[in-house]
Amino acid sequence: MKDEDEAFMGEALNLAQQAAQAGEVPVGALLVQEGRILGYGHNSPLSACDPSAHAEMQAIRMAARTLNNYRLPECTLYVTLEPCCMCAGVIQHARLKRVVYGAADPKTGACGSVVDLFSDPRLNHHTQILGGVCTEASAELLRSFFRARRS
């Protein structure tokens, strides 16, 4: 694990905190190419009334607009929670080089927890996956959020 991965994950955690403050599930993401942040976002499906407004989708959309290209082959996505199937599909279609995530998602994770979209040999692109970066901080943010919602 590189120091750079932890630093960018720290930025994603800040974005996740913004989501929590807005009453959204605390997930943050940013998309980086050669050390430059091209896009970022946090979960906002409730406030946007948009089921696709996940943190990953926000970051990928912004980066695609920044580069004026829907293909993002030399980019790394940093996200505090393992991507779901919807986000994994977009990651696959955008041809991201890497995904670095914090907490695993045992209910909807598509990077190995429930399904593993990226290891299917029938698919034509295989994004590199690195899980477990800043896992405890990512997981604690989620636990705290849901604990507060339950009480």
Image (cartoon, rainbow, N blue to C red):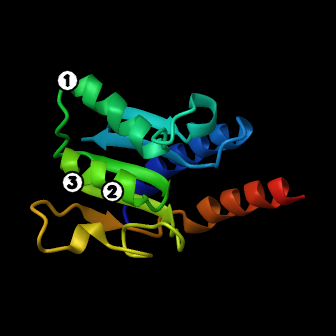
What residue is shown with label 3? 97
The answer to whether residue 45 shows anywhere in this view is yes
Q: Residue at x 29, y 48 (%)?
A: 90
Relative to 100, say whether 42 is above or below.
Answer: above
Residue pictured at 43% horizontal, 59% vertical: 84
Disc nearest the viewer among 1 and 2: 2
Residue 37, visible in the rendered structure: no
- Which amino acid type is shown beneath numbered disc 3? Lys
Label 1 to label 2, Cα distance in Å? 21 Å
Gap between marks 2 and 3, in whole Å?
12 Å
Residue 104 located left or right of residue 129: right
**Marks 2 and 3, the one that precedes in the sequence:** 2
Binning the other alpha carbons within 10 Å of mark 1 as few (below 14), some (14 to 19) or many (20 upward) gives: few
Helix, strand or loop at label 2? It is: helix
Q: Secondary structure at mark 3?
A: loop
Residue 124 occupies quadrant? bottom left
Query: Residue 49 appears at what percent x and percent y?
Result: 57, 32
Sequence-wise, the earlier of marks 3 and 1 is 1
Label number found at residue 88 = 2
